[in-house]
Amino acid sequence: MKGLAVVLVFSAILIFVGINSAYAQTTYIINMPTGSSSPDAPYFWQSEKDGSTTGDITIKTLDFVRWENADTQLHTVTSGTPDGGPEGIFDSGLIARGEFFMHQFTEVGTYDYFCVVHPWMTGIVTVTSGLQIIPNVGSDAGDGTTTFNVEYEFNRVISSVRVNEDQNSITFEIVGKVSNEDNTLMLMLPKKLISGPFVVWADGQQITNFELIEEGGINKVKIPLNRDTELVSLVGTAVVPEFGVITMAILAIGVISFLAISFKTQKFLMLYGKK
């Protein structure tokens, strides 16, 4: 009986771990719209993650991508490119209207795919190991030369970021459909980009139950949001410095030049001013 109890407990642990692992994975849907079989179609794919129509999508390891055929024609989702041919990583075979193909991506990398029947239909799946990245945040502040990459994790996509120097704030615009039920936005904000303490707003309403964790030069901010939130703003005590590296270098050169000219002028006056 004791051995049976141990087996049951161990089985329960495995089931619990398996359930939690499943919830950690996300499935992203890409539709093949009606008319996508024509090379003259306005677009060939539509991602429910962010509404993009390029066929390109960025996911994390162990996530799934599910391609659904809403067209009247048969399609395939085949790894590779029209020029190079199939790579053999995944291949849906023919997908009829109303059917789908799903693939789990277990390794970091970039995966090209296309439709063998309609080779103008191409896309790319980019698989990352962690957080999503917003590049060059701060390019709209100061002289535009001091920028930062901001990492975040969310079940939707941050499409744009605006820095307001007058209000010491950063505003994030969110798009796309919800891919899972965790509506907590986690932002990894460099302290040199924006300094706390923070006041947080979501669609004009103040959020008071956010969590702030300091990790070295990073402020990790966890913000609970609604599933349809569009704008999130953080107001701090300071944002990107007004003068970037290039501007400071130009100022330094100017100061040095001024001091050098002043020194030469004073020396000249000391030698010839009294004559």
Image (spheres, rainbow, N blue to C red):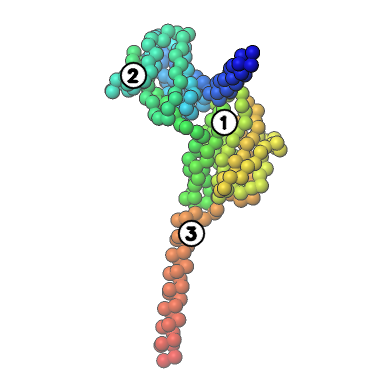
Q: Position of residue 29 (x, y in %)?
A: 50, 19
Disc 2/disc 1 C-alpha distance (Å): 31 Å
Residue topped by disc 3: 248
Q: Disc 3 or disc 1, which is closer to the eye? A: 1
Task: Tell me the amino acid under the disc marked 3.
Answer: Met
Q: Earlier in the sequence, mark 3 or mark 1?
A: 1
Q: Residue at x 42, y 7 (%)?
A: 96
What numbered label is drawn on residue 154? Answer: 1
Helix, strand or loop at disc 3?
helix
Q: Residues within 10 Å of mark 3 (few under 14, many from 20)?
A: few
Q: Residue at x 61, y 49 (%)?
A: 195
What numbered label is drawn on residue 213? Answer: none
Helix, strand or loop at disc 2?
strand
Is 75 on the left-hand or right-hand side of 13?
left
* The image quarter in which residue 87 lies: top left
Q: Is residue 30 visible?
A: no
Q: Residue at x 34, y 13 (%)?
A: 117
Residue topped by disc 2: 88
Q: Earlier in the sequence, mark 2 or mark 1?
A: 2
Q: Position of residue 78 (x, y in %)?
A: 36, 17
> Considering depth in this image, is 168 or 11 the residue closer to the camera?
11
